[in-house]
Image (cartoon, rainbow, N blue to C red):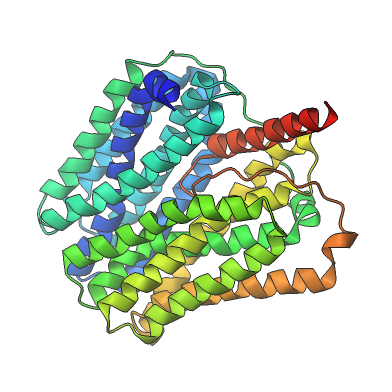
Amino acid sequence: MIQVLSGSWALFLGMFMLMVGNGLQGTLLGLRGDQEGFSTFALSIVMSAYFVGFLFSSQVTPKLIRRVGHVRVFAALGSTISAVLIMYPILVEPWAWTLGRVVIGFCFCGVYITAESWLNDASNNETRGKALSIYLMVQMAGIVAAQYIVSIGDVSGYTLFIVPSILVSMAFAPILLSIRPTPQFAQTKPMSIKRLIEASPLGCMGMFLLGGVFSAQFGMSAVYGSQIGLSVGQISLFVSVIYVSALFAQYPIGWLSDRMDRRILILWISFVGSAGAMVAFIFGDSFTAILIGAAILGATSNPLYALLIAYTNDYLEREDMAAASGGLLFINGIGAIAGPLTVGWMMETIGAHGFWMFSAALMFIMGLYAVYRMIRRSRADQDYDLTSYAAVSSASSPILVEVAQEIYVEEEIEENQSVSS
């Protein structure tokens, strides 16, 4: 762990500042948009736009890196993020914010791809797993720190929009001054969606549904909190609980994942997450109940992301695992684009607590589909090899998911070698 930190501390510091900036702009837009009188559906379009840009960038940024190099791509995308963050309070219009969110989604994905490829290049087989774990903690810590900054600032002013712009600009210094300028870069061509679905119907369906749950958490939680009358401090605590609970639950669920039928684990985690969301839906007048629901939903939905990737890997050949990451992220991205639009419509139709009904429904459908797959095909009849679970966040780029896939393969090879010897 110390070896990883000493070799990549500047990269982790830079990524922490980037995550604070990203976490700030997501919550801030929801709060400011509600103050400005944007409709719930208009805000849902704004929030959905981020995932459109993110998904598009996952396909385009690797081509840009190959053409002009990591440093130029990183600098260009980062400066664009800073400019868009300052633009938000100047052009307070839904259409302008929607375009800005598309651009910021594109740029943040590109920045993640660039930085995470540097992280992968700085790691070796012995340290890659530890680097991935530290990176996950840095991501969560950045998002949580952003909520605290929102709670002590003035949402109606300019300062909170300038702070993330400064943080993103400052993130360049430790990263660009500490890394090698041109790490080796090679992204695997994605596996076809049809082949992925044939290999793991549950994995693909789960990733699609989780895309909707994640985008609701990331994009619409602040809008929900504002509409039910929570203070800015309460909203910040509410959003923070989602991510803190996810961080603490990641490793116990990973431990269980490597020791039991993953379909049963997916089933129970999905139903528990749905039940947690329903607690907040039914007892939504109690802030304590809202925090409990947020903690349960965060602790179940976020680890499910890594669990579904590991489950899908069970049915793939080792050489196909990295290729599958692109397809899984594409499926997740489609769900993420549709998520804010659907939850926004539900919040306008049945009220603000439709936020919880949406998440509860998606998690429940995932559990039901797991039951269906278990009835349709027993585990004993399936051809699979249990692969290792590696924690990975839904905010990660395709590069980091491929790194996680490489860890699965390396650990499987090591286990086979130890058994044979």
Q: Position of residue 205 (x, y in %)?
A: 66, 63
Residue plotted at (32% across, 15% down): 177
Residue plotted at (40% across, 42% down): 137
Q: Quadrant of residue 334?
A: bottom right
Q: For the image shown, how many numbered marks are present on the structure? A: 0
User: Eyeballing the image, is 164 above or below 291?
Assistant: above
Please tell me which residue lies in front, 238 or 416.
416
Please tell me which residue lies in front, 295 or 359.
295
User: Eyeballing the image, is 357 above or below 217?
Assistant: below
Taking 24 as reference, is 344 left or right?
right
Q: Position of residue 223 (x, y in %)?
A: 29, 68
User: Eyeballing the image, is 64 above or below 153?
Assistant: above
Extreme-front residue of the structure: 421
Residue plotted at (84% across, 66% down): 378
Q: Position of residue 178 (x, y in %)?
A: 35, 16
Residue 227 visible in this rendered orientation of the protein: yes
User: Eyeballing the image, is 412 above or below 96?
Assistant: above
Q: Position of residue 92 (x, y in %)?
A: 20, 57
Residue plotted at (51% across, 75% down): 274
Quarter of the C terminus within the rendering: top right
Extreme-right residue of the structure: 381
Quarter of the N terminus within the rendering: top left
Q: Quadrant of residue 27?
A: bottom left
Taking 261 as reference, is 4 left or right?
left
Q: Quadrant of residue 202?
A: bottom right
Residue 109 visible in this rendered orientation of the protein: no
Taking 143 as reference, is 216 left or right?
right
